[in-house]
Amino acid sequence: MVAVRLAAMGERLYVVAGELSGDAHGAGLLRELLALRPGLELRGAGGPEMVKVAGGGIVDWVEDAAVMGVWEVLKKYGWFRECFARMMAELREFRPGVLLLIDYPGFNLRFAEAVRREFPGIRIIQYISPKVWAWNKRRIPKMARILDEVLCLFPFEVAIFETAGLKASFVGNPLVDQLQGVLAADISRDACLVGLFPGSREREVARLFPMMIEVAGRLRNWRMELNFEVPAATQKLAVKIRGLIEEAGAEGWIKVRTGGSHELMRQAGCGVIASGTATLEAACLGIPYCLVYRVAPLTYFLAKLLVKIEFIGLVNIIAGERVVEELVQADAKPEKVEEQLKCLIESPELASKMLERLAGVAAKLGEPGVEKRAAARVADWLKA
């Protein structure tokens, strides 16, 4: 009876995103979805960008919801439980035809399980799959039981989920759309410019950037004509980075720019990049680089127990082979990074070969129009 009643409310969508990145992706998808289904009613939880698109039906909770780490989550357990209960109550009152979950797997998959149990008629779509293929494959059968479809950003994910009996669609990667502007810009490549990309979080910067400063110093002693730049994701991070540069006495020869990481990737002849989305951006923007990754020893030990894949870099994972060098933990040290960058600087043939392989990876991310394709899949479920 519940399923029949809910099916009649197909023009209602409930959506949940719990981080700023998910808020940005969700806003783009909702904008396209409203163009396809102008009368669609929206409710849910997200961030400021989704609120702008959807209006008063979306609660902005990301500032409090976007926490990382087991201890941080445990400290806010009571708050998360209250949010969970409030959302379930909203669902009972709103009765949507479709529940759209955007990334944020820790909360969203638990929420999906509760919704599936109480409201079997609601169709549940996950946009941006959690990387369960890397660190928790045991979640895949659970996802197959509770989700109706997962919209994938990487082509290899489709077979993984479909093998488990979960409908999956490759809609492309949002990076393709996000980078169109900088790819079209008239930016010249400078072979003497080395990009230092220590990440967008303070903890990452604290662990990796002092090492990168030392690498820059070694390369400068090797070739005085080399220049070095580092992008800071925020003004606050720029202050932190400048402080580390001053401590090292490198303020005269390492330039800091607030934002502009994409432009720097288009300008620099090569770079060293912290593991993460930036390594995939580098593939799209055509900068040869080496990857570095360093976390607390206990975190790394636990990750090794959980992660069962050969590579940690997205480019290498997508390619299924080593395209860029990965310097992890003890290997992420100045002399090894220096060696890799020297090879790229000294050997245009090596750099050119890497760029060809990076372009091959970028081509696998799909064509522009990701949010439009994702919205079309959600619209199909609303019609159903």
Image (cartoon, rainbow, N blue to C red):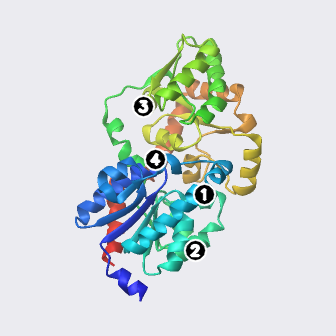
- Label 2 amino acid? Ala
Q: Nearer the viewer, residue 358 or 89?
A: 89
Which residue is at 59% across, 41% downward? Answer: 275
Q: Nearer the viewer, residue 134 or 139?
A: 139
Residue 266 badge: 3
Q: Position of residue 153 (x, y in %)?
A: 46, 57
Looking at marks 2 and 4 on the same chain, the residue that comes earlier in the sequence is marked by 4
Mark 1 or 4: in front is 1
Looking at marks 1 and 2 on the same chain, the residue that comes earlier in the sequence is marked by 1
Q: Which residue in the protein does label 4 denote?
A: 20
- Label 1 amino acid? Gly
Q: Position of residue 70 (x, y in %)?
A: 67, 51
Does dot 1 land on a helix, a strand or a loop? helix
Does the rendering let one see residue 208? yes
- Label 3 amino acid? Arg
Looking at marks 1 and 3 on the same chain, the residue that comes earlier in the sequence is marked by 1
**Crowd band around label 4 with a 10 angstrom C-alpha radius: few (<14), some (14–19), many (20+):** some
Mark 1 or 2: in front is 1
Looking at marks 3 and 2 on the same chain, the residue that comes earlier in the sequence is marked by 2
